[in-house]
Image (cartoon, helix red, strand yellow):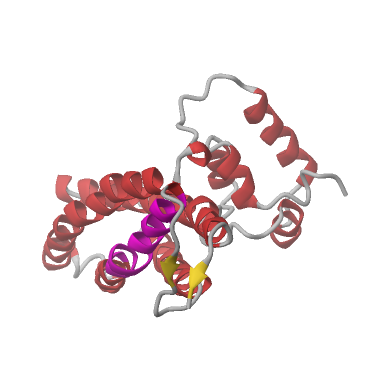
Amino acid sequence: MNALDETTIGEFVAHDFRTAALFSKYKIDFCCKGNKTLSEVCEAKGLNVQQIEDEINVVLESNSSSEMDFKSFSPSLLIDYILETHHDYIQEKTPILLTYLDKLCKVHGERHPELFEINNLFKISAAELLNHLQKEEIILFPFIKTMSDAIKNHETIQQPGFGTVDNPIAVLQHDHETEGNLFAKISELSNEYNPPIDACQTYKVTFAMLKEYEQDLHKHIHLENNILFHKAKELEQRFTVLE
Protein backbone atom coordinates (compact mmCIF):
# COMPACT_ATOMS: atom_id res chain seq x y z
CA MET A 1 0.00 0.00 0.00
CA ASN A 2 1.60 3.32 -1.02
CA ALA A 3 1.04 6.90 0.15
CA LEU A 4 -1.37 7.74 -2.64
CA ASP A 5 -3.59 4.78 -1.74
CA GLU A 6 -3.98 6.05 1.81
CA THR A 7 -4.51 9.71 0.90
CA THR A 8 -8.14 10.76 1.29
CA ILE A 9 -10.09 12.08 -1.67
CA GLY A 10 -10.59 15.36 0.18
CA GLU A 11 -6.84 15.72 0.73
CA PHE A 12 -6.15 15.28 -2.98
CA VAL A 13 -8.64 18.01 -3.89
CA ALA A 14 -7.46 20.30 -1.09
CA HIS A 15 -3.92 19.99 -2.45
CA ASP A 16 -4.92 20.58 -6.09
CA PHE A 17 -8.52 21.30 -7.06
CA ARG A 18 -7.87 20.10 -10.61
CA THR A 19 -8.18 16.55 -9.28
CA ALA A 20 -11.88 17.26 -8.65
CA ALA A 21 -12.61 16.92 -12.38
CA LEU A 22 -10.89 13.54 -12.42
CA PHE A 23 -12.88 12.28 -9.43
CA SER A 24 -16.11 13.58 -10.94
CA LYS A 25 -15.38 11.59 -14.10
CA TYR A 26 -15.38 8.41 -12.02
CA LYS A 27 -18.37 9.58 -9.92
CA ILE A 28 -16.20 9.76 -6.80
CA ASP A 29 -17.61 12.11 -4.16
CA PHE A 30 -14.81 14.52 -3.20
CA CYS A 31 -16.86 16.79 -0.95
CA CYS A 32 -19.45 15.10 1.29
CA LYS A 33 -17.57 11.80 1.49
CA GLY A 34 -14.08 13.19 0.93
CA ASN A 35 -12.76 11.58 4.12
CA LYS A 36 -12.42 8.16 2.44
CA THR A 37 -9.05 7.02 1.12
CA LEU A 38 -8.42 6.40 -2.55
CA SER A 39 -8.01 2.67 -1.93
CA GLU A 40 -11.31 2.48 0.00
CA VAL A 41 -13.20 4.27 -2.76
CA CYS A 42 -11.67 2.21 -5.56
CA GLU A 43 -12.42 -1.03 -3.75
CA ALA A 44 -16.03 -0.01 -3.09
CA LYS A 45 -16.60 1.07 -6.71
CA GLY A 46 -14.59 -1.69 -8.38
CA LEU A 47 -12.16 0.81 -9.90
CA ASN A 48 -8.54 0.22 -10.85
CA VAL A 49 -6.61 2.11 -8.19
CA GLN A 50 -3.34 2.08 -10.19
CA GLN A 51 -5.02 3.60 -13.23
CA ILE A 52 -6.52 6.40 -11.16
CA GLU A 53 -3.20 6.99 -9.35
CA ASP A 54 -1.52 7.38 -12.75
CA GLU A 55 -4.17 9.92 -13.80
CA ILE A 56 -3.79 11.80 -10.52
CA ASN A 57 -0.03 12.01 -11.03
CA VAL A 58 -0.55 13.46 -14.51
CA VAL A 59 -2.69 16.20 -12.97
CA LEU A 60 -0.33 16.87 -10.08
CA GLU A 61 2.75 17.02 -12.31
CA SER A 62 1.15 19.52 -14.68
CA ASN A 63 2.00 23.18 -14.09
CA SER A 64 -0.94 24.60 -15.99
CA SER A 65 -3.29 25.12 -13.04
CA SER A 66 -4.79 28.58 -12.66
CA GLU A 67 -6.77 27.42 -9.62
CA MET A 68 -6.31 29.49 -6.50
CA ASP A 69 -4.34 27.88 -3.69
CA PHE A 70 -7.14 27.86 -1.12
CA LYS A 71 -5.01 26.02 1.44
CA SER A 72 -2.79 29.12 1.63
CA PHE A 73 -5.77 31.37 2.44
CA SER A 74 -6.14 32.57 6.00
CA PRO A 75 -9.34 31.32 7.66
CA SER A 76 -10.88 34.81 7.49
CA LEU A 77 -10.00 35.24 3.82
CA LEU A 78 -11.39 31.81 2.99
CA ILE A 79 -14.64 32.65 4.80
CA ASP A 80 -14.96 35.88 2.83
CA TYR A 81 -14.38 33.98 -0.40
CA ILE A 82 -17.02 31.37 0.48
CA LEU A 83 -19.54 34.06 1.41
CA GLU A 84 -18.98 36.19 -1.68
CA THR A 85 -18.66 33.32 -4.14
CA HIS A 86 -20.85 30.48 -2.92
CA HIS A 87 -23.34 31.90 -0.43
CA ASP A 88 -24.20 34.76 -2.77
CA TYR A 89 -24.54 32.28 -5.65
CA ILE A 90 -27.09 30.22 -3.70
CA GLN A 91 -29.06 33.32 -2.71
CA GLU A 92 -29.18 34.48 -6.34
CA LYS A 93 -29.86 31.22 -8.19
CA THR A 94 -32.24 29.44 -5.81
CA PRO A 95 -35.36 31.60 -6.42
CA ILE A 96 -34.79 31.48 -10.18
CA LEU A 97 -34.60 27.70 -10.19
CA LEU A 98 -37.68 27.40 -7.98
CA THR A 99 -39.64 29.49 -10.49
CA TYR A 100 -38.35 27.58 -13.51
CA LEU A 101 -39.03 24.17 -11.98
CA ASP A 102 -42.60 25.15 -11.10
CA LYS A 103 -43.10 26.27 -14.70
CA LEU A 104 -41.68 23.01 -16.09
CA CYS A 105 -44.02 20.98 -13.92
CA LYS A 106 -47.04 22.90 -15.21
CA VAL A 107 -46.05 22.70 -18.88
CA HIS A 108 -44.21 19.38 -19.15
CA GLY A 109 -45.17 17.47 -16.00
CA GLU A 110 -47.82 15.32 -17.67
CA ARG A 111 -45.31 13.91 -20.18
CA HIS A 112 -42.37 13.96 -17.78
CA PRO A 113 -43.67 13.14 -14.28
CA GLU A 114 -40.12 12.91 -12.91
CA LEU A 115 -40.13 16.72 -12.96
CA PHE A 116 -42.47 16.74 -9.97
CA GLU A 117 -40.00 14.72 -7.90
CA ILE A 118 -37.07 16.83 -9.08
CA ASN A 119 -38.98 19.96 -8.11
CA ASN A 120 -39.88 18.55 -4.70
CA LEU A 121 -36.31 17.45 -3.99
CA PHE A 122 -34.94 20.84 -5.00
CA LYS A 123 -37.44 22.61 -2.73
CA ILE A 124 -36.32 20.43 0.18
CA SER A 125 -32.68 21.07 -0.70
CA ALA A 126 -33.19 24.83 -1.04
CA ALA A 127 -35.02 25.18 2.28
CA GLU A 128 -32.43 23.15 4.17
CA LEU A 129 -29.55 24.87 2.40
CA LEU A 130 -30.74 28.38 3.26
CA ASN A 131 -31.08 27.30 6.90
CA HIS A 132 -27.60 25.81 6.67
CA LEU A 133 -26.13 29.10 5.43
CA GLN A 134 -27.57 30.86 8.47
CA LYS A 135 -25.86 28.40 10.81
CA GLU A 136 -22.56 29.16 9.12
CA GLU A 137 -23.02 32.93 8.94
CA ILE A 138 -24.40 33.39 12.47
CA ILE A 139 -22.62 30.70 14.49
CA LEU A 140 -19.42 29.20 13.10
CA PHE A 141 -17.97 31.77 10.70
CA PRO A 142 -18.03 34.68 13.20
CA PHE A 143 -16.35 32.52 15.85
CA ILE A 144 -13.60 31.47 13.43
CA LYS A 145 -12.96 35.16 12.72
CA THR A 146 -13.01 35.90 16.46
CA MET A 147 -10.36 33.22 16.99
CA SER A 148 -8.26 34.61 14.15
CA ASP A 149 -8.42 38.14 15.57
CA ALA A 150 -7.61 36.90 19.07
CA ILE A 151 -4.48 35.13 17.86
CA LYS A 152 -3.41 38.15 15.82
CA ASN A 153 -3.85 40.47 18.82
CA HIS A 154 -2.51 38.00 21.41
CA GLU A 155 -5.83 37.94 23.23
CA THR A 156 -7.99 35.33 24.87
CA ILE A 157 -11.69 34.74 24.24
CA GLN A 158 -14.65 33.33 26.07
CA GLN A 159 -15.65 29.76 25.33
CA PRO A 160 -18.68 29.79 23.01
CA GLY A 161 -22.02 28.33 24.00
CA PHE A 162 -21.56 25.45 21.57
CA GLY A 163 -18.37 24.32 23.35
CA THR A 164 -15.75 23.20 20.86
CA VAL A 165 -15.87 23.93 17.12
CA ASP A 166 -16.20 20.18 16.60
CA ASN A 167 -19.88 20.47 17.52
CA PRO A 168 -21.13 22.95 14.89
CA ILE A 169 -18.75 21.41 12.34
CA ALA A 170 -20.35 17.99 12.87
CA VAL A 171 -23.81 19.50 12.29
CA LEU A 172 -22.68 21.31 9.16
CA GLN A 173 -20.99 18.22 7.76
CA HIS A 174 -24.21 16.27 8.27
CA ASP A 175 -26.05 19.01 6.37
CA HIS A 176 -23.50 18.74 3.58
CA GLU A 177 -24.05 15.00 3.27
CA THR A 178 -27.82 15.54 3.15
CA GLU A 179 -27.42 18.05 0.32
CA GLY A 180 -25.11 15.73 -1.55
CA ASN A 181 -27.63 12.90 -1.33
CA LEU A 182 -30.49 15.11 -2.51
CA PHE A 183 -28.57 16.28 -5.55
CA ALA A 184 -27.41 12.76 -6.35
CA LYS A 185 -31.09 11.83 -6.64
CA ILE A 186 -31.88 14.95 -8.70
CA SER A 187 -29.02 14.09 -11.05
CA GLU A 188 -30.30 10.54 -11.43
CA LEU A 189 -33.88 11.64 -12.11
CA SER A 190 -32.75 14.21 -14.69
CA ASN A 191 -30.54 11.73 -16.56
CA GLU A 192 -27.51 13.64 -15.29
CA TYR A 193 -29.10 16.93 -16.40
CA ASN A 194 -29.66 15.83 -19.98
CA PRO A 195 -33.05 17.20 -21.12
CA PRO A 196 -35.35 15.01 -23.25
CA ILE A 197 -35.70 15.44 -27.02
CA ASP A 198 -38.94 17.42 -26.70
CA ALA A 199 -37.45 19.89 -24.18
CA CYS A 200 -38.13 23.59 -24.74
CA GLN A 201 -35.50 26.25 -24.16
CA THR A 202 -36.60 26.82 -20.55
CA TYR A 203 -36.30 23.08 -19.93
CA LYS A 204 -32.73 23.09 -21.27
CA VAL A 205 -31.76 26.21 -19.32
CA THR A 206 -33.20 24.82 -16.10
CA PHE A 207 -31.28 21.57 -16.35
CA ALA A 208 -28.08 23.45 -17.22
CA MET A 209 -28.61 25.67 -14.17
CA LEU A 210 -29.24 22.65 -11.94
CA LYS A 211 -25.99 21.09 -13.13
CA GLU A 212 -24.06 24.30 -12.48
CA TYR A 213 -25.75 24.62 -9.07
CA GLU A 214 -24.63 21.13 -8.09
CA GLN A 215 -21.07 21.78 -9.30
CA ASP A 216 -20.92 25.01 -7.30
CA LEU A 217 -22.28 23.19 -4.26
CA HIS A 218 -19.59 20.51 -4.55
CA LYS A 219 -16.82 23.10 -4.59
CA HIS A 220 -18.49 25.00 -1.74
CA ILE A 221 -18.68 21.87 0.43
CA HIS A 222 -15.13 20.89 -0.47
CA LEU A 223 -13.73 24.24 0.66
CA GLU A 224 -15.46 23.85 4.02
CA ASN A 225 -15.13 20.12 4.74
CA ASN A 226 -11.59 19.68 3.48
CA ILE A 227 -9.97 23.07 4.22
CA LEU A 228 -11.87 25.59 6.37
CA PHE A 229 -13.04 23.17 9.06
CA HIS A 230 -9.50 21.84 9.47
CA LYS A 231 -8.21 25.39 9.82
CA ALA A 232 -10.89 26.11 12.45
CA LYS A 233 -9.81 23.11 14.52
CA GLU A 234 -6.17 24.16 14.24
CA LEU A 235 -7.05 27.69 15.39
CA GLU A 236 -8.83 26.37 18.44
CA GLN A 237 -5.64 24.67 19.57
CA ARG A 238 -3.52 27.83 19.33
CA PHE A 239 -4.85 30.05 22.08
CA THR A 240 -6.12 29.95 25.66
CA VAL A 241 -9.90 29.87 26.03
CA LEU A 242 -11.23 31.46 29.20
CA GLU A 243 -13.95 29.57 31.04
For the point 48% across and 68% down, which residue is it? 169
Left or right, 105 with respect to 54, comes to left
Give the percent coordinates (x, y) of residue 117: 30, 73
- Furthest toward the top, the residue is 63
For the point 52% across and 41% down, which residue is it? 71
Residue 203 highlighted magenta (yes or no): no
Left or right, 146 with respect to 223, comes to left
For the point 58% across and 45% down, which residue is it? 23
Nearer to us in this view, 135 or 102: 135
Nearer to us in this view, 51 or 36: 36
213 relative to 33, above or below: above
What main secondary structure does the magenta stretch of the protein show?
A: helix
Left or right, 56 with respect to 118, comes to right
Q: How many numbered tags mark residues here? A: 0
Any part of residue 51 in sight: yes
Nearer to us in this view, 94 or 121: 94
Give residue 172's quadrant in the image. Answer: bottom left
Any part of residue 197 in sight: no
Give the percent coordinates (x, y) of residue 51: 75, 39
Residue 147 highlighted magenta (yes or no): yes
Give the percent coordinates (x, y) of residue 84: 26, 46
Task: Report the magenta residues as a range.
Answer: 133-151
- Furthest toward the right, the residue is 1
